[in-house]
Structures are given as C-alpha cells and as structure tokens.
Amino acid sequence: MTEMLSVSASTCDQVFNSDATKSGSVASPGYPGPYPARSHCRYDFQGRGKERVQIIFSDFRLYHPTDNSRECESIDSLVAYVHIDGRMEKIDNFCGSAVPKPLMSNGPRLLLEFRGIYSSSHSRGFKATYTFTENFGVTSGRQLDDFPCAFVFNSSDERQGSFASPNFPGFYPRDTECHYFFHGKNQEKVHLHFNYFDVEGVLPCEAISASDYVEFSNFMARDRKYSRHCGQFKEFHIESDRKFFRVTFRSNDRLDGTGFNASYQFLDEVDSYTVKPGEKNTGTSTIAGAYLLVVLLLCLPLG
C-alpha cells in the first residue's frame, strides 16, 4: 500500500546528495539528547546512476506506549520510503527501542520520515550511518561492470569463501537482480552451503505467485535441472556439475525478506563433500533418490 507524504516543509529537513559526499551520519533532532515533541523531519537521500542508499542504524530509542503494541501507527516512528514506478512507497515503519536491520533502496533515492509525536526524557531518538554504494552491500567477490549487479568468484583467487544477498543481514532491496558467477579450474566443481535462507515467495517460485527467488545453473541460461528456491529453508547445499556455476537472486517490487548467507568451496571432481548433521541437499541428487525409491517400490512383488 502506498502512503502519501505531507508536502509541508520542516526546519529539521535535510537533503543528502552523493555529489557532495558518499557517506556520513544522520540522527534525530537533538541526538543524543531527547528529541522535542511534535518533531517532523524528512531525510532525503539523493544518489545517481547505479548507486543504492544503505542505512545502518547504531542507536534507536523512540518513545513507545506501555501497552506493548507492535503497531507503529500514530506513535513516535521512523518511516522509510523508496521510489517505485514514479511514486514514493513505504517499505517499512520502525518504532520502540529495537535497533532496525540495515536498509537499502531499490534505486538511487531513499527517504526517511521521522515522526516524533510525543517524546520523553528517555527518548534519545536514532542515529545511523548512510552510504551511497554501487556494490549492493555485497562485500565478497569481484564486481563486474558489465552487469547492474554481478560478482565473480575465481578458484584461482580463492578456493573457498562466502557470499550473501544484497544488504544482508538487512532486508534485500526490491526490484533487484544479482548474479554470482563461480569459475573453477579444469576438473573442478563448486559446492555451495547455505547457512541461512529467507527469500519471500511460495513454490514453485514463479512470476504467477509474485515470488522472489534464487536460481542455480551450470550455464548462463536457465538450467531445468535445479528448481528455483524461495521461502524459508534451514541450511542446505547445492553442487555444480562442472567448473562453471551461476547463482541468480531476483526480487520483485512487493514484499521482501532478509535474503541468504552462504559459503562456497571449489572441489576437484573426485572430491566429495561431507554432509553435516541435519544438513539437507535440495539439488537434483535428492530428487533422483526419491524417484529411484518410487521405482523400487513399484517393482516389489505384491503380497
């Protein structure tokens, strides 16, 4: 649902432009002291091109009634908006004293609106750092300039490491597609172990269900061998058939999740990966095993 913004200006409004600085801090009025009652401030972040706005909170304490209500409407709150189809759309609303997870815009602009309706002597407001970044908050791999969001992992550089969805462990940005390309040496394959997975969607993770998803492929094109993954999973692992492997993350312009965190390891083709206790393999080996079990059951003599 789109929430309209008030057009009246406020004395505490601020504009942060990436032409002036690529990073800095932002805080509620009077921080670290209590913010005044009836505060209404807008913080407008204006990047350019491929830049995304990332907000990481270090302190958050807004006045909150004692009824333990989790709703942030009509009380002191901080609201985040992004541009979607030419309009400002609310993506989240924060209140109380829980420090929000990192935020990231879906494009070069993001707006924070602070509504300090009541305040109190213990309500010191919020403080955060902002960054105009082109790496989508992905801190591993080598970013490729030929794609809006793509990172390459070469066995010749590192045989093992980690990778994550944009802005992890915060909510991933909407309407975003990121590729992770794994290049092994000859006679190598890549093994991926997902430690955390929370991608908004329902099986089979297609457009008809408005699902975000993660897709795996041994090629640049889609690989029907692997089903798309969405929803929430406990840890699982996926393995390539050959030296190249592609992982694609895709989010739409609707709901979002906290994404995924995974590790990778390049193995010689003769090597085998030992499955950890409680770990699942959701690749085609599991599907093939289930199919073989059905065939064996059908072949058993009756009686």
Image (cartoon, grey):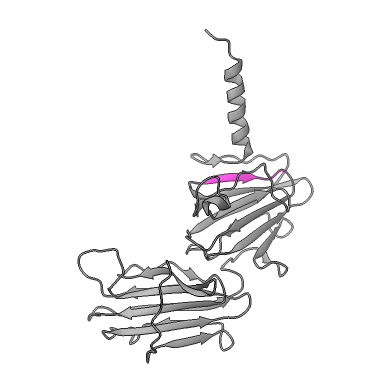
Compared with 157, 81 (above or below) is below
Can residue 33 be seen by looking at this rendering? no
Answer with left or right where residue 24 lies relative to residue 147.
left
Question: Farthest residue toward the right?
Answer: 186
Answer with left or right where residue 271 lies relative to residue 78.
right
Q: Nearer the viewer, residue 184 or 173?
A: 173
Percent across and percent down for residue 15 are 48, 87
The magenta stretch spans residue 236: yes
Q: Nearer the viewer, residue 93 or 64?
A: 93
- How many numbered callouts? 0
Q: Residue at x 64, y 49 (%)?
A: 216
Question: Farthest residue toward the bottom?
Answer: 11
Instruction: Please give the range of residues in magenta.
Output: 235-241
Percent across and percent down for residue 32 are 33, 83
Percent across and percent down for residue 51 are 60, 76
The magenta stretch spans residue 270: no
Residue 148: name its quadrant.
bottom right
